[in-house]
Amino acid sequence: MLFETYDKEYKSTLTRIGGSMLLFLLLFDLLIPLGMDISQIFENYLDAKSVYIIDSIIGSVAYMLSFSIPAIFFYIISPKRYC
């Protein structure tokens, strides 16, 4: 009986982790190319140094969002337990 409880918790945790990983992969595959497309727009209007800076900022923001949004999603869907 005790093992059934742990088994349910284990499966539930793995499901939440899997969903968060799928969200990460989806965001990573969408945000990084989108950031590259946006930085290509700036290439027509700015010099190389400015484009490099903007490209770095956009890439960093996209990378940060692709990691933080799934972490927040995992926190929201996890059951709240108090000690």
Image (spheres, rainbow, N blue to C red):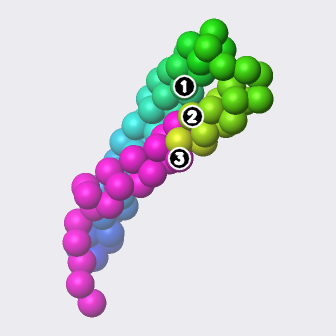
Percent coordinates x, y for residue 9 in the rendering:
30, 64
Q: Real-space Cα distance between discs 3 and 1?
A: 12 Å
Q: Dividing the image into 4 quarters, which one contains the C terminus? A: bottom left
Residue 8's image quarter? bottom left
Can residue 40 be seen here? The reply is no
The residue carrying pointer 3 sits among few (fewer than 14), some (14 to 19) or many (20 or more) residues within 10 Å by Cα, namely few
* Residue at left offset 66%, top offset 19%: 46
Give above or below for 23 relative to 76: above
Query: Which residue is painted at 35% across and 55% down in the image?
Result: 72
Residue 66 location, x and y as percent?
A: 48, 41
Q: Do the residues labelled 1 and 2 touch (CB within 8 Å)?
A: yes
Location of residue 47 (image quadrant): top right
Query: Would you name the residue on which mark 1 appears?
Result: 35
Residue ID for mark 2: 58
Residue 47 magenta-highlighted: no
| Relative height, residue 36 to residue 63 (above, below) | above
Who's the residue at 63% across and 32% down the image? 54
Q: Is 64 situated left or right of 76 in this image?
A: right
Residue 78: quarter of image: bottom left
Label disc, if present, on residue 64 of the rendered structure: 3
Q: Which mark is residue 26?
A: none
Asked which secondary structure carries label 2, the reply is: helix
Horizontally, residue 78 falls left or right of residue 49, namely left
Type of amino acid under label 3: Met
Which portion, as a residue range, is magenta?
A: 62-83
Query: Quadrant where the N terminus lies?
Result: bottom left
Alpha carbon distance from label 1 to label 2: 6 Å
Mark 1 Cα shell of 10 Å, populated few (<14), some (14-19), many (≥20): many
